[in-house]
Image: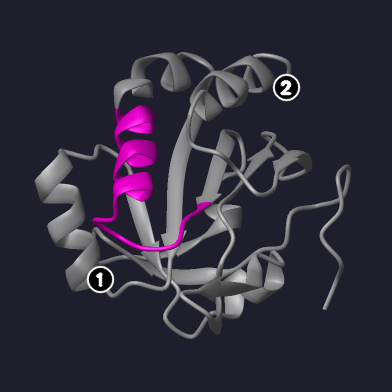
Amino acid sequence: MSKIEIGNLAPDFILKGSDGETHKLSDYLGKKVVLYFYPKDNTPGCSTQACDFRDSIPTINNENAVVIGISKDSLASHDKFIAKFGLPFLLLSDEDKEVCALYDVLKEKNMYGRKTIGIERSTFLIDEKGILRKEFRKVKVKDHINDVIENLKKL
């Protein structure tokens, strides 16, 4: 397993998408990719983040970029999340957590004194050649979209 590193080829993967199709990261060569990992559909922070991406889609598209979200949720959960918030981008289901592990976003969390392993909110910016150019770890939702767009324009 290759270590994820800025300046290297972003690790490729294959996952089922909310559109019913199978998707590979390499399918998006020629476009910039905003790849974001989030903990759970229909939770306050994740809903705000998804809506921020939704509201910025015209700007993101103008940068020749696509948004792809990944969580451990099922495709059925993704369908409800997309319908509830009118999300115009792809959500991928990583129920086996293989891609989450590949991108090193699985972290120990402490919820009410109970330790669990969950997704640490993270965003990766990948250029048209598939090279990882920027990573955001331990993302705080507020103003994150502005950081993403600002950095996307620099790619």
- Give the quarter of the figure containing the C terminus: top right
The residue that disc 1 covers is: 75
Disc 2 to disc 1: CB gap under 8 Å: no
The amino acid type, in three-letter code, at marker 2 is Leu
The amino acid type, in three-letter code, at marker 1 is Leu
Label 1: which secondary element: helix
> Where residue 62 appears, x then y in whole percent?
46, 14
Task: Report the coloring of the rendering.
Answer: one colour
Residue located at (16% from left, 41% from top): 85
> Where residue 151 appears, x then y in whole percent?
68, 21
Q: Which residues are magenta?
A: 37-54
User: As drawn, is 18 to the left or to the right of 110?
Assistant: left
As drawn, the label of residue 155 is 2
How packed is label 2: few (under 14 Cα within 10 Å), some, or many (20 or more)? few
Is residue 41 located in the magenta-colored stretch of the structure?
A: yes
User: As drawn, is 49 to the left or to the right of 130?
Assistant: left
User: As drawn, is 102 to the left or to the right of 56?
Assistant: right
Quarter where residue 99 is shown: bottom right
